Amino acid sequence: MEDYIIRGIDEKGTIRIFIASTTNLVEEARKIHNTSPTATAALGRSLTAAAMMGAMMKNDKDILTFKISGDGALGNIVIVANNKGGVKGYVDHPYADVPSREDGKLDVGTLVGRNGTITSIMDLGLKEPYVGQARLVSGEIAEDLAHLYSLSEQQPSAVSLGVLVDRDISVRAAGGYIIQLLPGVSDDDITKIETTLSKVMPISTLIDKGLAPEDIMEELLGQFNMEVLDKISVKYNCDCSREKIEGVIISLGKKEIEDIIEEDGKAEVVCHFCNKKYQFSKENLKSLINS
């Protein structure tokens, strides 16, 4: 099944939903970073969340940076997304893992850690980026994101994120949804949504059963007259280039580059997001100083 996000709204304009199917995206990230099963789940949930958050932004040049910094063995999770379905990310310690929980599920909360922060930085082309931050609630990411929305944006949201890792440690199913209540929503409608959410299967199970985002919207909000406003393809998209890396080296300053030439005679820079290696010879580095 292809990876994509749908954006939907009810006929009264009081309930909006974003649903993402991201199995291929998360498997691509797993291959790039060679993550442990629990790290795959943490990175996959975060990539899915950021892809949906990116789809909420209005302009093509808007950039979202989504960061989770917990006190667990995984270290930081850093994701960057745009509003066209492009997303990339990494974790500090991709090989870190912890035993599964008693119910057999991957223990993402322990690997991420329950003490720390969840941060959303939206660069909307204004003087200052818009920053939202909250303390972690559980480290499971979905609850933490719902908490961030309620705190920084006073936006009541139900968030579900799921990654099903197969026995061969590949990604079998991944996806998520964000339901947001808009001004004017009735108490009756809120109760209906809460009742449905208390009974619905996990999002990764729905995707594993072959349900597309449109089918999942019917499962979740079938009693409301929903309309799909958008369908956005999702892909792992690292836009690193030699020119960008050269810019990073130049920003170190003449003295630092001269020190690198003196000590090593060359440099290798690895992109965090895609692990691509860029080699710079002594001559390359000298020409960067001159430029």
Image (cartoon, rainbow, N blue to C red):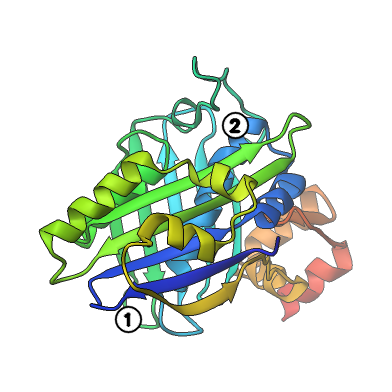
Per the model, the C-alpha gap separating discs 1 and 2 is 38 Å
Disc nearer the start of the sequence (1/2): 2
Q: Where on the picture, by quarter, is residue 22?
A: bottom right
Give coordinates of residue 1: x percent, y percent. Answer: 71, 60
Mark 1 is on which residue type? Lys
Picture layout, residue 159 above or below residue 52: above
Quarter of the figure with the C terminus: bottom right
In the rendered view, does 130 fall on the left or right side of 57?
left
Which disc, if any, is residue 187?
none
Picture layout, residue 222 above or below residue 70: below
Crowding at mark 1 (Cα within 10 Å: few <14, some 14-19, many 20+) = few
Picture layout, residue 268 above or below residue 250: above
Please tell me which residue lies in front, 281 or 258. Answer: 281
- Mark 1: secondary structure: loop
Mark 2 is on which residue type? Thr
Give coordinates of residue 102: x percent, y percent. Answer: 49, 14
Q: Is residue 8 shown to the viewer in this render?
A: yes
Residue labelled with disc 1:
127
- What residue is shown at x 25% (from left), y 48% (from top)? 194
- What residue is shown at x 32% (from left), y 39% (from top)? 136
Judged from this view, the residue extending furthest toward the front is 223
Crowding at mark 2 (Cα within 10 Å: few <14, some 14-19, many 20+) = many
Residue labelled with disc 2:
38
Please tell me which residue lies in front, 6 or 64. Answer: 6
Please tell me which residue lies in front, 251 or 86. Answer: 86
